Each structure stands twice: as C-alpha cells, then as structure tokens.
Amino acid sequence: MILKNAKLYGQDGRWDIHIEVGTIQTIKPAADTGQSSNNNDVIDLNGKIVLPPYVEPHIHLDYVLTAGTPRWSQSGSVFEGIEIWSERKQLINESKQDIKDRALKAIKMQLQHGIQHVRTHVDVGDPELKGLKALLEVKEEIKPWLDLQIVAFPQEGLYTKPDAEELLVKALEMGADVVGGIPHYELTREDGVRSVIRALELANKYDKLVDIHCDEIDDDQSRYLEVLAGEALKLGMGDRVTASHTTAMASYSNAYTYKLFQTLKKAGIHFVALPKANLHLQGRFDSHPVRRGLTRVKEMLAEGINVSFGLDSIMDPWYPLGNGDLMSVVDVGLHACHMTDFNHIVKALDLITTNGAKALGLKGEYGVKEGNQANLIVIDADDEYEAIRTQAPVLYSIRNGEVIVETKPVETTMNVSIF
C-alpha cells in the first residue's frame, strides 16, 4: 500500500508512505508514484493529515450504555453516580455476556472515530468480578483492531469494604494491566493516603502501571495528588503513574500549586483530564460563580508535564452523553481551559495522540515512523488549525497496513443562487 501526497501531522510538505507486510517501510517526499493497472493499493490523500491513531486514556467500558438504570442522576454529582452504580449492581444481575455486548458497542464507536488504543477502568468491587472477566475476554477478541489496557479499579474505595483489597489483588493476578484507586472516596483521609501507598506497592509487586482517580472533587483540601507524586518520586516509578481527573487542583491556591508543581515535575507522572465529563460533574455544590471543574491543563503543559484528554464515559450514571469521539473532547477542552490561542490549537491533537500514548507506556512502537507497525489514521483536513476548527472526521483508520475503517466525507449541495 502507498499513501500518496500525505500531510504528516506537525510537518510541512507532502509525503509518500510505503506500507508493506503491515509495516511502514519508507516515508519520502511526495513523488509521482502513479497508480498502475496492477497496483490498486495507492491511495492519493491530496494533502490530508496522517497521524498516529487516537488514544483513549480513560474510559469505563463496563459502565457504558447504562444511563437511566435503575434511575437517572438528579444532582449530576460524582457521588450520586457512585450511589446509582452501587444500586444497579444490587438490583440488576447482569451476565458477563451482557457486559461484553455493551462494551463491544462502545468499542465500535471508538473504532469509527479512529481510536486504536484504549485504557479502560473496570470496577473490581463485585465478588464475582464479572466486569473484569468480560473485559479480559473482550481484550483478546478485539486485539487485531484495538489495544486494550485494563485498570483494576475499586470504584467504592479500597478500605470501605472488608474484601475490597483482596478483590483488587485477585484482579491483578487474573491479568489486569494497571492498578487503580479512588482515595478521595475512602472513609477517612488516612485511608485515602493508605490506598495510594498500597496501589504503588502492588504495582511494584506485580509489575503493573498505576492510574488513580485522584482528587475528583471541588474540595481545595483534597490533596492526595501530592501523596501520589511524592511516593512515585521516592520509588522512582513516576513514568508508570497516571493521575486522572485531579479536579481539586482548580480550587488550590496558587501558592500551594506552585509548590505542588515542583514535585510533579520531579516525579514525572502523567495526567488525564476529562473535559466533558468533569464540566458536567463538578461545580454541583456551587451556586455562583460555578467552578469549571477542570484540572490546570494549560499550566501543566507550560511546565512540561504530560497531560492527555479522555472521554471518561459513554451514557452511564456519571455522564449521560458521549459517542466515543475524542475530537469533540478536544474542542470542549480547549474552550474550557482557555487554550484557544493559535499555538495551543495547532498542537491540540497531541492531547489525544502522543500524550496519551506516553501515559499508556506505548513508547517507541507508537507513531508514524519508518519501521513501525502501519497503525495510523487519516483525517479530513490539510492543516492542523483547520482540523481542530472543523473537528475533522477520520477518513481512514489503518491497522497493520489494512484499512479497518473508511468514512466517506459528507457532501453538501447548496441550492442558493448567490453562491
């Protein structure tokens, strides 16, 4: 296969990408490769942008498509979402196959939007671990088209129930890739600190990554992030650690945040911001002014701290919308974070590609480079600014040199004489 006249993301000029046996063989300045009668594998992109596949660094595939069962959230808060999910587990005896079916529907949405790498959190508070078993099977079944990382996530806390820690350990031994946690939901601050330390201990013991739901609250005294970063720094494992949400940071004083940033930079941990979900969930206890509920994305990026964007939910008790489209997350996030200046706009696709890849530990195997697997997408724009302005759709998603998704551009006819 030859992708002819490609615009490489972040680079000038046009390029020809030669793919053979599932690998990117060469990337050279565009030439007149032509399309002979015996070669039907030349696609002329006419300057459309080629970039690595989108990365979804934070989703809950065991929760998808459950909004309204057993009831809709009235407050829209994180805590009511947890309450509804707990009620659902008691009232609805869902089979492993039911969970798989819902997850696969969501994955189909993600594939259609150019996502090929996903990190999903899975609730491991169920004694039967049905959600984990379902997602472990899904992980193997979808491997030809999408890479799935599974976070063992104690949704209701690690020390709120007698068997929670035991179930987390069992989930890791069954094959979960990442240790999760939710310290701000523990019964006491001390338990929250203990849960963070335990997560890092387990990650070292089982050679896993770490991704903590950290300080997802509007409380300026919720400061588990400093514990997570400090412990990661001491253990020298910052590159394996991700802090998700961290919405309390928006309420921290600037003086405290300055001190915190010094630790974050030394530790080298990753961050995932969830613009759509947290704009919906946060500020629910405010009257006016209502807080935006997002972590300090712009400030962290300026300090060289790795931040990526994720969706978080697709129609579940925490977020009633969502369709797997990360481009819409970027659009909302740039507005909410006051990042609509030109420089942030033209680099915004980093937030759903390379930055997320770093958090997932993909490293050298990710990217449109000679010698890498031919995993890439083509979007319907010929420059980075227009890609964001128009929320350019994915035209092709290519996996191991094969087109797995192709979308025809929308064609509009104007029946207006002035034009």
Image (tube, rainbow, N blue to C red):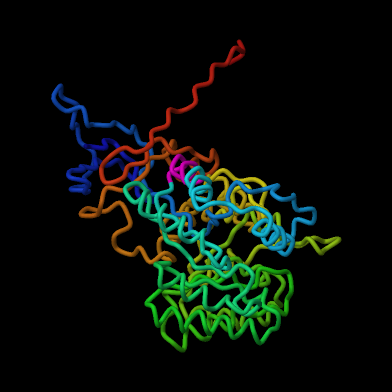
Q: Pick the quarter of the image with the N terminus.
A: top left
Question: Where residue 387 sits: x, y (%)?
Answer: 48, 42
Q: Pick the quarter of the image with the C terminus.
A: top right
**Residue, x 40% and y 61% (percent of image)?**
357
Find residue 3 and report its image quarter.
Answer: top left
Q: Name the residue furthest right.
A: 287
Query: Residue 322 vs residue 33: left or right?
Result: right
Tell me the magenta residue range.
Answer: 106-114
Q: How many marks?
A: 0
Magenta highlight: main SS: helix
**Residue, x 24% and y 40% (percent of image)?**
16
Q: Is residue 214 magenta?
A: no
- Relative vertical location of residue 25 with respect to residue 278 in this rendering, above or below: above
- Relative vertical location of residue 232 with respect to residue 13 in this rendering, above or below: below
Question: Where residue 323 sits: x, y (%)?
Answer: 56, 43
Query: Residue 320 vs residue 130: left or right?
Result: right
Question: Where residue 50 sits: x, y (%)?
Answer: 35, 44
Question: Where residue 398 sits: x, y (%)?
Answer: 32, 42
Q: Nearer the viewer, residue 215 or 181?
A: 181
- Relative vertical location of residue 314 with respect to residue 266 in this rendering, above or below: above
Query: Residue 306 vs residue 39: left or right?
Result: right
**Residue, x 81% and y 64% (percent of image)?**
285
Q: Is residue 109 magenta?
A: yes
Q: Nearer the viewer, residue 37 or 75?
A: 75
Q: Nearer the viewer, residue 364 or 189?
A: 189
